[in-house]
Amino acid sequence: MITVARILRSQGKDGELRLRFSYIAPTDCSGLKSVFIGREGDLREYAIESLVPHGKDFDLKLEGVDSLSQADCLAGLDVLIPEETLKEREKDEFFLFQLIGCSVIDGLGKTIGLVKDVLSAGRSDLLVVEREEKEILIPFHESICLEVDVPGKRIRVDPPAGLLDLNEI
């Protein structure tokens, strides 16, 4: 199971939910008949009645969730789907969630850290890399991330001088 969205809040009085997708484009899971909602280990399957774009978010209507109070109970929970239900990618394409857990190495093969998360930051995504008990942000841009080997769980980077020290969080 992979997390594809988070429920932000209830929307309206008829049990609709406002959600935001993460790591994937909503079109990558189009045609889904159901989703799982909850947290890993405590999930419940719901049939989808409708999924409608609303700006950068989406309004989701689930079968059996018909009131504001029922929808409010789901606010803040994750929306998950089985990974095999995602649309096939081209040979050198991947989903952002597949970068989590990748080793980040420099041009000499020295390990910088592990990708802990991927943040959407406008034009370029940011890799949140855990390094020596700290986190650093590395722009996920072709000028910095030179090679991405998803099956090998490795990303080779050539960061500008000072970048790795500049943005420790």
Image (tube, helix red, strand yellow):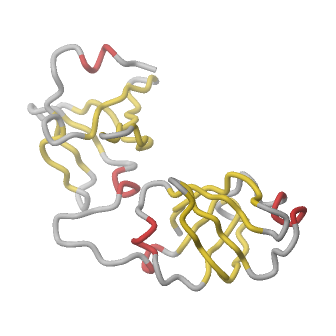
Residue 52 in the image: state x and y as whole percent.
57, 70
Residue 111 in the image: state x and y as whole percent.
24, 33
Answer left or right for 153 relative to 82. left
| Front residue (pair 36, 66) | 66
Residue 7 in the image: state x and y as whole percent.
67, 57
The image shows residue 79, relative to residue 123, as above or below, that is below
User: At 46% across and 78% down in the image, what residue appears?
Assistant: 30
Q: Quadrant of residue 33?
A: bottom right
User: At 68% across and 64% down in the image, what residue appears?
Assistant: 41
Total numbered labels: 0
The image shows residue 87, relative to residue 37, as above or below, that is below
Answer left or right for 56 relative to 9. left
User: At 38% across and 26% down in the image, what residue appears?
Assistant: 136
Answer left or right for 160 relative to 164. left
The image shows residue 100, relative to residue 115, as above or below, that is below
User: At 64% across and 61% down in the image, what residue appears?
Assistant: 40
| Front residue (pair 155, 138) | 138
Residue 61 in the image: state x and y as whole percent.
70, 74
Q: Quadrant of residue 159?
A: top left
Q: Quadrant of residue 13?
A: bottom right
Answer left or right for 81 relative to 15. left
